[in-house]
Image (tube, helix red, strand yellow):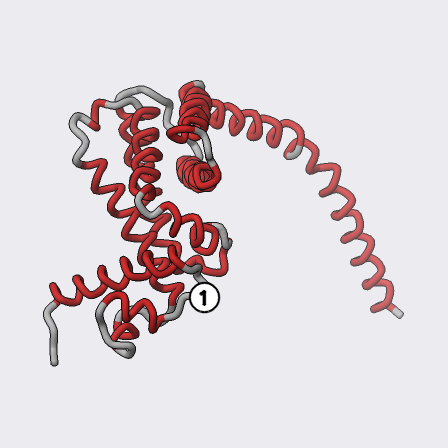
Amino acid sequence: MKISQEQKAINRHAIIRAAVAVISEKNFKSSTMRQIAKAAGIGDATIYNYFATKDAILFAYYGDHMQGCIQALTEVADFHTFTLQEQLQTLFETGLEHYLADREFVEKTFHRVLLRGSRDWAQVKPVRTAFLAAVDDMLAAAVEVGEIPEPVFQELIGQFFMDAYIGVAHYWLADESEGFANTSVLIDQGLDLACAMLKAGIANKIFDITVFLFKNHVLNRLDRFVEPVRTMGKMKRQFMEGMDER
């Protein structure tokens, strides 16, 4: 029987929430697709119409989580008037707040999804793409109002904040301080330092110094390498001409 797109979305969400419940109670390895299907109230075979593996369910959870965070930012009153640091802090804190209800599940699965390197890049890409797009918008807005100079490595800066966000979330999962106070301090001080460096144009200055050194200490010395190569080429031609005469 054909079902509507709305029902498919409902079933998909039910499977993800069932996986959260089952994996939180057990662990990832001990949980099975059959158990998740049963908890979601769908058939054992039907679940495979939505997700081929347990890992696919995890990636869907984290993808939905990030999209939910970005959507929440659009609903923050006067978000566009925040400073860059305030916007980044709101993004980081919103991510952790959305994890809070599922903290046990996140603790058991976070490393499997976001700390596995390039092997699962295609599955993790939607999470990173959504985050990087949000950060790029924040950086562009900060440049437009003159809060920071235009970064020469904006894409790398976005990647830095993505990695910082993953690091903060990992720290939060182990944070036993009251109200996760230690994590709050880490976010405050970390973003304060990062934004101070952006305002000072540190990355741009490093780039300028690198270009200066390259021009004055590498390009100016190329002749030392080029001349021996030319000499060797000349000697080779003379040798070959001598061989031909014989």
Which residue in the rendered view is the most extreme toward the bottom? 1
Pick the front one: 133 or 216: 133
Q: Mark 1 Cα within 10 Å, few/some/many (few <14, many 20+)? A: few
Query: In which image quadrant can residue 100 be found?
Result: top left
Q: Is residue 110 above or below residue 93?
A: below
x and y percentages locating residue 220 in the rendered image: 66, 31
Q: Position of residue 222 (x, y in %)?
A: 69, 37
Q: Residue at x 76, y 53 (%)?
A: 233
Q: Is residue 175 above or below residue 53?
A: above
| 231 horizontally vs 117: left or right | right
Measured as percent of width and height from the top left, residue 163 is found at 46, 41
Q: Which residue is mark 1?
A: 30
Q: Is residue 200 above or below residue 153?
A: above
Q: Answer with left or right where residue 119 lies relative to residue 84.
A: right
Q: Position of residue 92 (x, y in %)?
A: 35, 35
Residue at 80 percent across and 51 percent down: it is 232
Q: Residue sitting at 33 percent across and 56 percent down?
A: 20
Secondary structure of residue under mark 1? loop
| Amino acid type for the residue under numbered disc 1 | Ser
Point out the image quarter for the C terminus: bottom right
